Amino acid sequence: MIMNKTDCYKLGHVFQYPENTQVIYSNFTPRSDKLFAHKSIFWDRRVVVFGIQALIARMVKEFNETFFSVEKEKACRTYARRVKSLLGPAAGADISHVEALHDLGYLPIMIKALPEGTRVPVGVPVLTIYNTVREMFWLVNYLETYMSCELWKPMTCATIAYEYRRTLDHYAAKTGVSPLFVQWQGHDFGYRGMSNSADAAACGAGHLLSFTGTDTVPALDFLEEYYFADSDKELIGGSVPATEHSVMCAGGSEPGEELETFRRLIEDIYPSGIVSIVSDTWDYWDVITNKAAILKDKIEARGYDTYGNSKVVFRPDSSDPVRIICGYRDDELTWNEDNEIVSIETGQVLTDAEIKGSVRCLFEIFGGSINEKGYVDLSPRVGLIYGDSITLARCEEICSRLEQAGFSTSCIVFGIGSFTYQYNTRDSLGFAMKATFAVIDDTPKAMLKDPKTGDGLKKSATGLLKVNEDLTLSQNVTVAEEVEGMLQPVFYNGQLMNQTTLAEIRNLLLG
């Protein structure tokens, strides 16, 4: 039951507020980026607003299905039982506030939010919430736990995806790559490493605000269910046929067997279009040099799909992605006493292929062309995707090294997985819901949290809040001023309002 989806300490707050409390007004804000580990070279301390509409839709559905539509005595008995089990028999004796909510039959709250797709500065609220029925003041922050849990991660992941997108856009513009390629250049690989399927769907949807490449199928369902997307009419997300290690292992590990697996995939099973083949099941450098050269004629003889694509994508899946893709710079190499070239960092003896890196190895076999910006585009018949432990910093370094070596960034797609999207917490962007205003015994009261033992980051806003058109925050405003701000009603007394679509969010975010 959704009434149990809260922190235990919330159960008693209804009795702790001052007598005759009538209104509680709270806000949800990203307060700090000091723990945000995904700051691109362009980081401007702005957070992507996303997930509010989905949260509200799910919250309403759960309240209707598990509370309001359940017979009152049963619903309240279920609530009282849990309170008693946690806090003792006396704590569950008075549940009149829950009974009154059930009698009301809807959520008596107003939620106002910034448009989803907005990039809001750290420290500015993304939403405010207050009760519309005086007796239900306790409900506002009772919902904090559920709302925070459902919101912080999709917003964090949407923000991270946007930082990847503008990093890739930057290098694409610099090295002559089409923006149409960039929308596919960040590919969501995160599903299996997320905390659960619902988490993967919501965060995968956040990824799809900035990109269209994804392997997270439930992310499309999420956007269709909550954001009016329709895969029959618009591009939500897409992928390509791709192998995994079980496929490659099943084909056999002998050189001739692995070569035959590659041949069968590119000639018999996928004779046209794009196919991605994991290539490091055994000897990656043998694949990217010897086997690629043997298969060159067959790769170049493949047909085109309806979109004009004919490409074999090699997927390395282990070791250092920067070195695998870009190879070594001269200042990273030295000679050992046996006159062998070794890595200065590790002392490892390096082969010629390792020194060159994957892009140059493929270029020497398949060639390429000089684009209008003067950079080398790898032959469109081959490409690379790397999806193991990719971070924004590694993505940026790979793009930078390719640029320095004279290659455009069109040769590489990044598989962005749970190493990026899972290793975050609510504190990554400091998300918190705090009350800043109340009405007590018909008297308005501005509230302020300002711990003297803190560093200032936990200091709350105060009073009624207005987000101005330039996305700055005004505090202690009048009721009339609060109504005029950028925060617009998205939920009122059980009904969603001013709903948005995936297309509208993408347009606002990416233009």
Image (cartoon, rainbow, N blue to C red):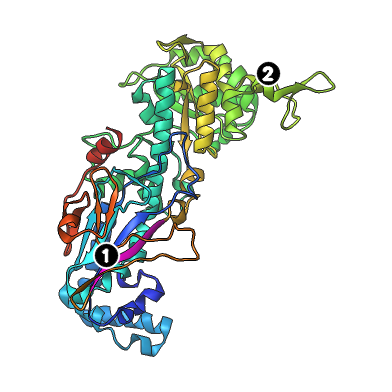
**Is residue 166 or residue 271 the one in the foreground?**
166
Give the x, y percent position of residue 80: 32, 82
Q: Quadrant of the rendered structure where residue 351 is?
A: top right
**Is residue 451 or residue 427 the one in the foreground?**
451
Q: Is residue 215 visible?
A: no
Quadrant that contains the N terminus: bottom left
Q: Is residue 32 left or right of residue 322?
A: left
Q: Residue at x 31, y 47 (%)?
A: 49
Disc 2 packing (10 Å; few <14; some 14–19; many ≥20): few
The residues colored magenta run 431-439
Quadrant that contains the C terminus: top left
Q: Is residue 495 left or right of residue 426?
A: left
Q: Quadrant of the rendered structure where residue 380 is?
A: top left
Q: Quadrant of the rendered structure where residue 329 is?
A: top right
Q: Residue at x 40, y 52 (%)?
A: 153
Mark nearer the N terminus (1 vs 2): 1
Is 361 covered by the magenta stretch? no
Q: Is residue 229 visible?
A: yes
Amino acid type of disc 2? Asp
Please identify the residue farthest to the right as the structure is shown: 337
Q: CA distance from mark 1 to mark 2?
A: 60 Å
Give the x, y percent position of residue 390: 52, 37
Give the x, y percent position of residue 294: 57, 15
- Main SS, magenta residues: strand
Q: Which numbered tag is attached to residue 244?
A: none
Give the x, y percent position of residue 13: 34, 77
Q: Which numbered tag is attached to residue 62?
A: 1
Helix, strand or loop status at disc 2 = helix
Q: Which numbered tag is attached to residue 352?
A: 2
Amino acid type of disc 1? Glu
